[in-house]
Image: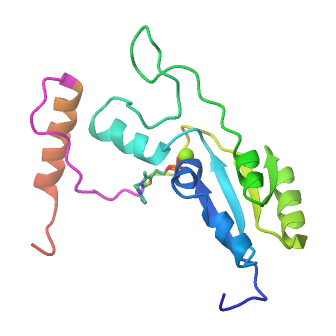
């Protein structure tokens, strides 16, 4: 709004997009164009990473069908058409798979007047490199699960080594 001559880009995950896609409608109402690059990796994958590091089991963070044999959400990935979803709210949308397709879509989106959404398939289990910092997020103190107990022991070891700056 402050710089109407500028392009505004949003980089967002599929999970975060699902929490509030209706901003697209607002952008159409106000004729304020935004270009959304939607990284589709079929789940709340950074939270799943945290879950694997702190609990040791995957649960409920991926967009997967329930497997009625195991009764767990570890079945097929649910196909979600994010481009169609964005189009339904008035955006122009692209589905891209490669770097070249992404560059082309970005050029076309820049020339577009409407809010634009570029959906790009992203590797599910390939996150950024570790930061090397220790983050005070505890594994459960009481658990009968050996995997979680191991993670709790690692947490306590980390906590004992932690230098406390503020408290
Ligand atoms: C409003 C809100 N609810 C919950 C969270 C907690 N949260 C942080 S990251 C994240 C998962 C994001 O998943 P996605 O957008 O698909 O990104 P990915 O990690 O898969 O790349 C969640 C739920 C948040 N940051 N904001
Ligand atoms: Mg995601």
15 relative position to 156: left or right: right
Residue 76 shown left or right of residue 145 in the figure: right
* Residue 156 position within the rendered picture, expressed as x and y whole percent measured from the top left: 13, 46
Name the quadrant of the C terminus. bottom left
Q: How many marks?
A: 0
Q: Which residues are magenta?
A: 131-146
Q: Main secondary structure of the magenta part?
A: loop
- Residue 12 on the magenta segment: no
> Which x, y percent locates residue 50?
36, 44
Taking 128 as reference, is 112 above or below it?
below
Residue at position x 86%, y 73% in the image = 113
Where residue 11 sits, quadrant-wise, is bottom right
Q: Nearer the viewer, residue 43 or 140?
A: 43
Image position, residue 57 (x, y; %): 34, 29
Q: Residue at x 14, y 38 (%)?
A: 153
Quarter holding the N terminus is bottom right
């Amino acid at each position: 709004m402050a710089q109407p001559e500028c392009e505004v880009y949003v980089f967002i995950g599929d999970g975060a997009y699902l929490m509030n896609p209706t901003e697209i409608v607002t952008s159409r109402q106000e004729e304020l164009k935004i270009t959304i690059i939607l990284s589709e990796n079929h789940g709340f994958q950074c939270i799943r990473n945290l879950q694997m590091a702190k609990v040791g089991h995957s649960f409920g963070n991926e967009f997967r069908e329930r497997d009625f044999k195991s009764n767990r959400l570890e079945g097929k990935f649910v196909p979600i058409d994010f481009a169609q979803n964005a189009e339904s709210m008035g955006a122009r949308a692209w589905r891209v798979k490669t770097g070249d397709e992404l560059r082309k879509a970005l050029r076309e989106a820049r020339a577009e007047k409407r809010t634009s959404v570029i959906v790009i398939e992203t590797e599910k289990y390939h996150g950024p490199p570790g930061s090397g910092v220790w983050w005070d997020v505890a594994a459960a103190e009481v658990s009968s699960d050996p995997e979680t107990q191991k993670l709790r022991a690692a947490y306590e070891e980390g906590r004992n080594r932690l230098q406390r700056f503020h408290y």
